[in-house]
Amino acid sequence: MAVLQAILPIFALIVLGYVLGRRQWLSNQAARELGNLTFKLFMPMLLFSGIAKASLDEGFSPGLLLAYFVPALATFVALNVVGHRLRGRPTPFGLTASFSNNVLVGIPLVASLFGSPGLVYVFAVLAFHSLLLFSFQSLYGALAGKEAVDVRSLLLNLANPMIVGLLLGVLLNLSGLQLPAPFEHLVQWLAQAALPCALIVLGANLSNCHLLPSREALGIVFAKLLVFPLAVLLLCAGLGLGPLAGSVLTVMAACPSGVNVLGFARHQDDNRVVSSAITLSTLLAALTLPLWVFVSGHL
């Protein structure tokens, strides 16, 4: 019951954003502007305030990062090999199956289920998530295709406002200092706007995606929602990570595919497959996420 109570508000806000987008009550331009404000201000404030007060002892351990990113990269490679054989060129299929929507879905879900102690594991993964997987996708496109490695774009990932928010929060945490009360209240107010705005933006973005469940899209969704989280859960157990870390990492791996992977779809066919996979994984995650929360909590 607690899992459903945590998940239902998240998907209700996504559905609300979808309806607003479909009816154009929230136009594409307005959704882009709200998204920019959310990811450049509200979300960095949420990450800053969360990591500034978190316990960092376990969060950035090598075992934790290995338990998440080894399965992520294995999924990335396996799906790209299959996609390359099907298309005869680089595809974003591996990225779609390995890149979780940990900001829009993962943070609110972990915060609802596990509270602040669980968020430190989310922040540790987020510190490397986009930079690592997007860099590998760019290198794959350059080495296996005809794309040039965009070093500037890779470096801009380091200047991402959310990464900056994380780093500033870590520095404040390590310093042992506290923000003055007026600034603390300001940060909290801005942080409170992050999750509802982000979920509504996600729903609005999904209203522009296509749901055409092809064989490729179904394969990506199967790998994303079932294979990837299972591999993370087993590796967490093998590495002896605690039950909280194992549950949080499994939930993060089981989150649906992130919308930003669409930026790596260079062909119309790939765009249709990726759009369908993102939409379908978001819909089915409402069913599979409670399953993974239950399984990870009973191992």
Image: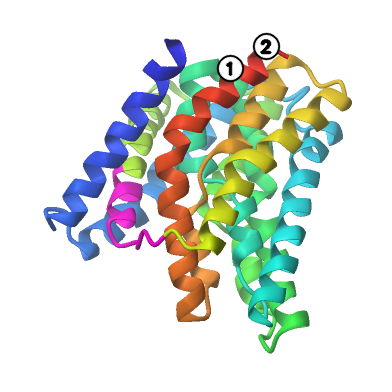
Instruction: Look at the image and give the residue range highlighted in magenta.
Output: 200-212
Q: Please state if 177 lies on the left or on the right of 76 as rendered.
A: left
SS for tag 2? loop
What amino acid is at disc 2?
His
Q: Nearer the viewer, residue 159 or 256?
A: 256
Marks 2 and 1 in Cβ contact (< 8 Å): yes
Judge whether 281 appears above or below 240 on screen. Answer: below
Q: Is residue 209 magenta?
A: yes
Q: Is residue 93 visible?
A: yes
Seen as rendered, the residue at the extreme bottom is 146
Question: Residue tagged by mark 2?
Answer: 298
* Quarter holding residue 6: top left
| Quadrant where the C terminus is found in the figure | top right
- State whether residue 51 is above or below residue 266: above
What residue did someone put label 1 on? 294
Q: Horizontal placement of 246 versus 61: left or right? A: left
| Residue 18 location (% of width, % of height) | 25, 48
Q: Is residue 258 left or right of residue 81?
A: left
